[in-house]
Structures are given as C-alpha cells and as structure tokens.
Image (cartoon, rainbow, N blue to C red):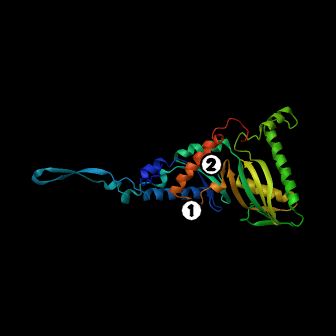
C-alpha cells in the first residue's frame, strides 16, 4: 500500500489525537515545552491547505429598480481579520509528569483526545528511571548547582565502594518503608506474601518511593547514580543527593537530572527539539499507540504489583 501525502489541514487535524514522547531539555520548564510544541503545531497546520473564507449573500440595487442577489466573500471570516485558522487555544496538551526546570529527558505528552490516555498513565504510576549526577565537596542552599554555596568539605576519603554500600543501605530502608506503608510486619507471613507477588506500588501520589538505586559512574568529585522511583519530584531528588553527601561524611549537591525511562517510554525514542513539528509528532503518536498496545498494563492495572 503506497503512502498518500495529505495537504489538507482539516484531514490532518482529525488524526492529531494521541500520546507523544518528547525530550525535555534542561533549563526549560514543562510549560515552556508545552507552549513551544503547541505553537509549532499551529504553525504547521496553518501552512497546509485550510478552508476558504465563508460566503455571504449580498443584495444590491440594479437597473430598472431591480435587485441583484450575489454571494461575496465574508470579510469577517478572512484570516487577515480573524487571524490564522488554527490557534493555540484550539490545541489541548497535558503532561504525564511535572518535571522541574533543571530536569531533562523523557516527557510524555497527550494531545487533544490523548489527554485521557495520559491521565490513565499518570494514575497507574509507572516506574521512572533517572540518571542523577552529583558533585561532592560543596553544599548549596537549594541542593542544586544554580544556588549559593553554603558549605565545603573534603572528598579524598570517598571511593566508589563506600558510595555503593551507602546506596545499598538506602535502598533497603526504602524497601522496608514499603511494607510499613502497607501496615504489615517485616517478619510476618503477610509481608512474605506481599514480597512474592512483586514490587508494590504506593496507593497515592504523595509518597515518594525508591525501588532501586545504584552507582552508575564515579569520577571524583562527580558521581552518577541510577534511580528507579515513583512519585519523585525534582526537590526530592536534590534532597536525596544532599543526604548521600552527608552519609559519606561530606557534602554534595546535584548538578544534573535526566529521566531515561518513563514506564515503557524510553529515551532513544524521544522527539528532540528540532523534531517538534507536525510530521514528527504524528509519527510519534503512531509509535506511542503501538507501544501502548504492546503494554496494556500502562493503561489498565489489575493489581498493585509493578509490571
């Protein structure tokens, strides 16, 4: 079956419903990304063939006291008067995760009828994976590199083995917290029954939970950790890096956060900034639709276990 090039904006608009996976650059807020994509889509739609201005009936006097009835262009519907056919208010876009300004990486967006799909993904609370880079030896007010330095400490005594042991201890404490939130004793049969079912997700969006944390790279004074988490926020991740620094008998602050996976949406399939146009967005919707068909648990969870 051969592909057909569609140049009619109304036809393209009918298919502009779905979910896309875009790469959010660091330094931009989620709202700035959203406004940029909406503006690009409206620009590309208006460059296609749009409907002509409406016609109105005009009655004019003619010869011998007769009236002439004819149709003329309705100037009140002309694009020079009312503006482009597709405007930013026509597009509805919702994000699946509220990443902070300093966070980069995977960002899932729903467009038009895709808003309900994104809402269901958000309610199912899929696991997100981050690569976080910290800087040892300096502590800042906000725990990030764009604020004032408030403390300094030595880092010569810190090695990769020491960081790995600390991260393993933090992961164990978070796993213990999961059972405490479920209201069961760690030494009981109920705790064992929960453990054999798989990883349990929290019941609401208010409690951050870390399911896995490991050291990915260490180049003193920089270290990079990989975190598998749910309900996390940018301030929480910055506070986590600060606590790692204190646990190492030093101080640290966060210099970079990158989301490399959101559920089954991966970093290598994200639309880069130069791909935020109509053609790439439609292709991204088709790819996301196929991904959700392959992994229906992202939309319809039947249990509390992570899949």
Residue sticking out furthest to the front: 1
Q: Residue at x 35, y 56 (%)?
A: 78
Horizontal and vertical percent for residue 14? 46, 47
Please tell me how crowded label 1 is: few (under 14), some (14-19), or many (20+) other residues with Cα within 10 Å: few
Residue 162 is at least partly visible in this image: yes
Number of the label disc, if any, that sits on residue 274 = 1
Residue 19 is at least partly visible in this image: no
In the picture of the structure, the residue carrying the numbered disc 2 is 96
In 3D space, how far apart are the residues under numbered discs 2 and 1 (Cα atoms)?
Answer: 21 Å
Vertical side of 145 occupied by 73: above or below: above
In the displayed structure image, the side of residue 29 where residue 138 appears, left or right: right
State which mark lies toward you, 2 or 1.
Answer: 1
In the displayed structure image, the side of residue 142 where residue 167 appears, left or right: right
Which residue is nearer to you in this view: 266 or 77? 266
Residue sticking out furthest to the right: 157
Q: Residue at x 54, y 53 (%)?
A: 283
Horizontal and vertical percent for residue 264? 66, 48
Horizontal and vertical percent for residue 58? 23, 51
Horizontal and vertical percent for residue 223? 80, 62
SS of the residue under disc 1: helix
Please tell me how crowded label 2 is: few (under 14), some (14-19), or many (20+) other residues with Cα within 10 Å: many
Which quadrant is home to the C terminus? top right
How many marks do you count on the picture?
A: 2
The answer to the question of whether label 2 and label 1 lie on touching residues, with beta carbons closer than 8 A, is no
SS of the residue under disc 2: loop
Residue sticking out furthest to the left: 64
Q: Which residue is drawn at 88% across and 58% down?
A: 162
Number of the label disc, if any, that sits on residue 208 = none
User: Which quadrant of the view contains residue 189?
Assistant: top right
Which residue is nearer to you in this view: 34 or 61? 34
Nearer-N-terminus badge (2/1): 2
């Amino acid at each position: 079956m051969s592909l057909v090039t569609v140049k009619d904006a109304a036809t393209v608009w009918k298919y502009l419903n779905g979910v896309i996976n875009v790469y959010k650059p660091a330094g931009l807020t989620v709202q700035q990304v959203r406004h940029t994509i909406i503006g690009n889509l409206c620009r590309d739609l208006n460059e296609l063939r749009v409907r002509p201005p409406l016609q109105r009936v005009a009655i004019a006097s003619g010869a011998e006291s007769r009236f002439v009835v004819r149709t003329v262009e309705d100037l009140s519907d002309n694009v020079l008067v009312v503006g482009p056919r597709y405007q930013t208010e026509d597009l509805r876009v919702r994000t699946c995760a509220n990443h902070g300004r300093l966070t980069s990486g995977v960002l899932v967006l729903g467009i038009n009828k895709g808003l309900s799909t994104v809402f269901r993904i958000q309610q199912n609370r899929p696991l997100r994976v981050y690569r976080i880079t910290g800087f040892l030896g300096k502590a800042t007010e906000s725990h990030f590199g764009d604020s004032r330095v408030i403390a300094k400490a030595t880092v010569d005594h810190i090695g990769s083995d020491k960081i790995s042991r600390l991260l393993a201890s933090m992961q164990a404490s978070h796993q213990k917290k999961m059972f405490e939130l479920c209201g069961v004793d760690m030494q009981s049969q109920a705790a064992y029954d929960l453990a054999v079912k798989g990883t349990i997700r929290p019941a609401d969006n208010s409690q951050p939970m870390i399911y896995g944390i490991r050291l990915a790279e260490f180049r003193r004074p920089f270290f990079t950790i990989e975190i598998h988490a749910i309900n996390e926020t940018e301030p929480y991740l910055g506070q986590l890096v600060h606590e790692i620094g204190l646990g190492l008998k030093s101080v640290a602050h966060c210099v970079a956060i990158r989301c490399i996976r959101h559920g089954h949406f991966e970093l290598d399939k994200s639309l880069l900034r130069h791909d935020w146009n109509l053609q790439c967005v439609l292709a991204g919707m088709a790819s996301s639709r196929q991904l959700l068909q392959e992994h229906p648990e992202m939309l319809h969870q039947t249990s509390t276990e992570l899949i």
